[in-house]
Image (cartoon, helix red, strand yellow):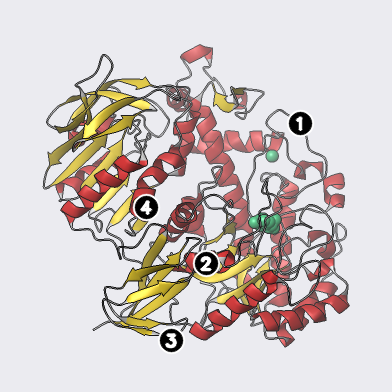
Amino acid sequence: MINSPKIRKIVYGGDYNPEQWPEEVWHEDMRLFKEAGVDIVTLNVFSWAMLQPSEDEYDFSTLDRIMELVKENGLFVCMATSTAAHPAWMAKRHPDITRVESNGMKRSFGARHNSCPNSPTYRKYAPELARRLAERYKGFDNIVAWHVSNEFGGECYCENCAKAFREWVKSRYGTIEEVNRAWNTAFWSHTFYDFDEIVPADLRSEEFSWDGQLRTNFQGISLDYRRFLSDSMLECFKLERDELKKITPDIPVTTNLMGWYKPLDYKKWADEMDFVSWDNYPNYDSGPAYPAAVHDTMRGFKGGQPFCLMEQSPSVSNWHIYCKLKRPGVMRLWSWQAVAHGADTVMFFQMRRSIGACEKYHSALIDHAGRNDTRVFKEMAALGAELKKIGGQTLGTRIKADIAIVFDWENWWAAELSAGPSRLINYCSEVSSYYNALFSRNIAVDFIAPDGDMSKYKLVIAPLLYMNHEGYDERVREYVKGGGTYITTYFSGWVDDNDLVLPGGYPGKQKDILGIWVEESDALPEGEENSFIYKGTEYPAGTLCDIMHPEGAREIAVYEREFYSGTPVLTVNDFGSGRASYVGCHSNDAFYAAYLSDICAELGIEPVLDTPQDVEVTRRENDEYSFLFVLNHKDEKSEVRLREGGTDILTDKVYGSGDLLPLNRKGVAIIRTEKK
Ligand code: GLA
Ligand code: ZN
């Protein structure tokens, strides 16, 4: 992690681009950083053109001066490798480095995150630059992490990618016969006789836009192209990482992820990273549950180890469609929310606001006024002081959860690439429905991959897990048999890893666990709904209404309308010493809250604390202490009754058990309790 033994506090700072400014400004920056309590800068994120002015010329002189200056000023460095935007000369001289879009348009030079991941030029020069940086700066003991490239992402469909895709397919399937089977190419005369006939899945081949959504004729091919692109970019990450590791084996390597970013299979990525870091830019109106869910997802990648909040905005993000200011207190509140969910750093984009190009209206610690008395600067300086005050107390502490939600990128791709049954199928929003019900009650949740360890959880929820990866049902079977409780939903378990339907009635291999089989699914258009009654209250049933037959499961609720009225929509099956519940449709927040509350009560899963609505509580702990993070997301004051007493480490106020803890609007408290 970034918090090496050298840093015994939550590091504070972020992206700093002094190369965009004359040198006299740098000294002013150093002064202002000190005032704001900044102790880390992420340097060198977009400097490739400066560092390599031509094919065989490297120039580190400016970066040398920057490195000397920040070292003199006692700053830690998260050192980027600058490979997220290639130089113009490189694009001109080696056009293979620019990408081709899905419609076949070859890009010229421009923008960023613009290199083809299978370009020989990129794969030569990016690791080469990483190597030279490591060689040159290995003596700087203030470098606490390597930050490879920046926000890997996007797509490419060029000839080099096509070639690499064929190799990728070959190594995944071995023979062309196996490819034909996996992709079901007997459909529409698609049989391939040679790997050379295979082309990328794009707008020129299988993909098309239909009513504003991306569709494909062949899910198997499109799915594999996504896997391939994610792997290709991961390969680029690994090439740089391996160069860095050869020279500075002790400096951890990361790259900044983007949360629930669809194109890259982040679980696979995280396995290659020394620590997880991510950039949190929620919309002004996204509400606190969404970033909480994403923080929890990031924490889950490495089994609950703390992660790094690499970027967030001090106030506005220029690329949001409305650059609504973060209200006073919100930057602080969201920073603490990240920590409350497992972050051990609080970092930002950016330290000084640029004057030209598209990010000139993105907020910064130092904005265009260049002063230390702006609202944002003062709020950031106050947070800097707070972080200094609490020091390293919370570092490395963990969150304990009894519930896991299964989250899977390949499933996300497959479920939403599916042509039918409904354009309303939305993986993340289904996951959020379940997560939010637990979040609003302050019940801790971990996110796990489908091959994650279920055994330590009392409850595992797999919303809309359309894809039953090879062996997944066996893991669920074992978990439930052994006493676990499992909940899954409509449109789950239908297909295998290649998006081929598992025949014999849905959900394929999970029917015995759930004690049901689904015969048909009724996709209700937006605005139409069926309903069901659960414990005396009527709830809506929509999106997809599975029409199922119990085979051992108990009916908990039935549909109220339509030709399938009276048939089950919600079931529970006792299986081994555990049970498995099937929720056959999408419903509303009130239902998820009611159903999950009942299940939690039965399983003895407790909220961290009961609080008024929009007051969030989490707990991080180690062997000696428990830290209760209390976050008031409301615009007015609030209060919570503490179960246990302790000390608010932000104010040093001491509270007894049963005391009322007062909270300002957007207020935060961190109650430390010593364990007995
Ligand atoms: C991303 C990038 C940064 C910057 C910010 C702006 O997270 O990594 O370089 O562009 O967005 O919000
Ligand atoms: Zn390409």
Q: Which of marks 3 and 4 is in front?
A: 3
Residue marked by disc 1 = 105
Q: Give the mark, 1 or 2, whose residue is nearer the N terminus.
A: 1
Is 184 placed left or right of 539 in the picture?
Answer: right
Q: Dot 2: what SS?
A: helix
Q: Which of marks 4 and 2 is in front?
A: 2
The C terminus - image quarter: bottom left
At 60% from the left and 78% from the top, the residue drawn is 382
Q: Distance between the residues labelled 3 and 1?
A: 60 Å
Residue in the foreground of this view, choosing between 291 and 667: 667
Q: Is the residue under label 1 in contact with that under label 4 (CB below 8 Å)? A: no
Q: Which of marks 1 and 2 is in front?
A: 2
- The numbered dot on residue 448 is 4
Q: Dot 4: what SS?
A: strand
Type of amino acid under label 2? Leu
Is 139 placed left or right of 654 in the picture?
Answer: right
Residue 30: quarter of image: bottom right
Residue in the foreground of this view, choosing between 97 and 410: 410
Q: Distance between the residues labelled 2 and 3?
A: 18 Å
For the view shown, which residue lies furthest in the front direction? 636
At 73% from the left and 40% from the top, the residue drawn is 99
